[in-house]
Each structure stands twice: as C-alpha cells, then as structure tokens.
Image (cartoon, rainbow, N blue to C red):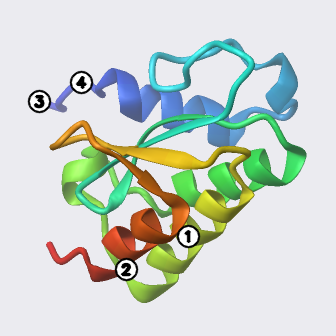
Amino acid sequence: MKTPKSEIEIGMEEIINEDEWDNHNLIHCELSGKEDYLLLKWGAIKEWNLHSKKGKQLLKKYFKTLKAGGLMLYDCTPENKKLICEIIDEANLDKIQLDWTGKWVSKEKAKKYVMEYKQ
C-alpha cells in the first residue's frame, strides 16, 4: 500500500508543476503577506515568503532538490547548500529565523548555519 503524500510534498509538486507561479494558490508553507520571510530548519528552508521573480525561480529550483519525505530527508549537498545561500541573498530582509531556537540571525549567520549544517 502506498503511503499518502504529506501536505508539504503535495505543495512542492504543485509549485514545481505550476506554469504561472503568481497565479498559484498559497500552500501552507508559503506565508501570506507582503514582506519576505525565511525560516530555516535542519539546514534547509522550512517556511518562506519571497516576492521577487528571481527568488521565486530559485525556490522552484530548490524544491526540485527535495526528496519525498520533505526536510527530514533533505540531501545537504554542497550544491544544495549553495542554492539556499543564493535564496538567502535574494530575500529582501535583514534577519532570518532559525526554527529550533526561534532566534533571528543576520543573512551571514544564516548562510553559515546552512553551510556548516551536517545531517
């Protein structure tokens, strides 16, 4: 028997397959609102809200790197870490939230967290 897909897996598929991102109905991991936001967990992006065209393109590319099972099975390759750092740089914000501690950190500290994270 096949295991049903989680909401995040369904949401990732919808974004990857969506032809027109701007017309996409927000899924539960993308927050509504006008300000950019990133939440990191396990060295990966857990929640997001990016508005720039480049940011949305980078997110699409990022979702294609995720495996079934979502963040817990995320493959922290150097290429994937670099992609997350590009997303962090593209985000229009000064601080990024870390999920485990709830702390807000600078972009540089967030990128350091991503690059040094080990599974």
Labels 3, 4: front one: 4
SS at circle 4: loop
What amino acid type is highlighted by mark number 1? Cys
Residue underneath mark 4: 4
Q: Are marks 1 and 3 in contact (CB under 8 Å)?
A: no
Q: Which residue is mark 2?
A: 115
Give amino acid for label 2. Answer: Met
Label 1 neighbour load within 10 Å: few <14, some 14-19, many 20+: many
Q: Which residue is mark 3?
A: 1
In this view, the residue in front, 7 or 50, is 50
* Sequence-first disc among 3 and 2: 3
The crowding category of the residue bearing disc 2, from other C-alpha atoms within 10 Å (few below 14, some 14 to 19, many at least 20), is: some
* Residue drawn at 45 percent across, 75 percent down: 81
Q: Residues within 10 Å of mark 3 (few under 14, many from 20)?
A: few
Q: Give the percent coordinates (x, y) of residue 38.
A: 50, 41
Marks 4 and 1 in Cβ contact (< 8 Å): no
The mark that comes first in sequence, 1 or 3, is 3
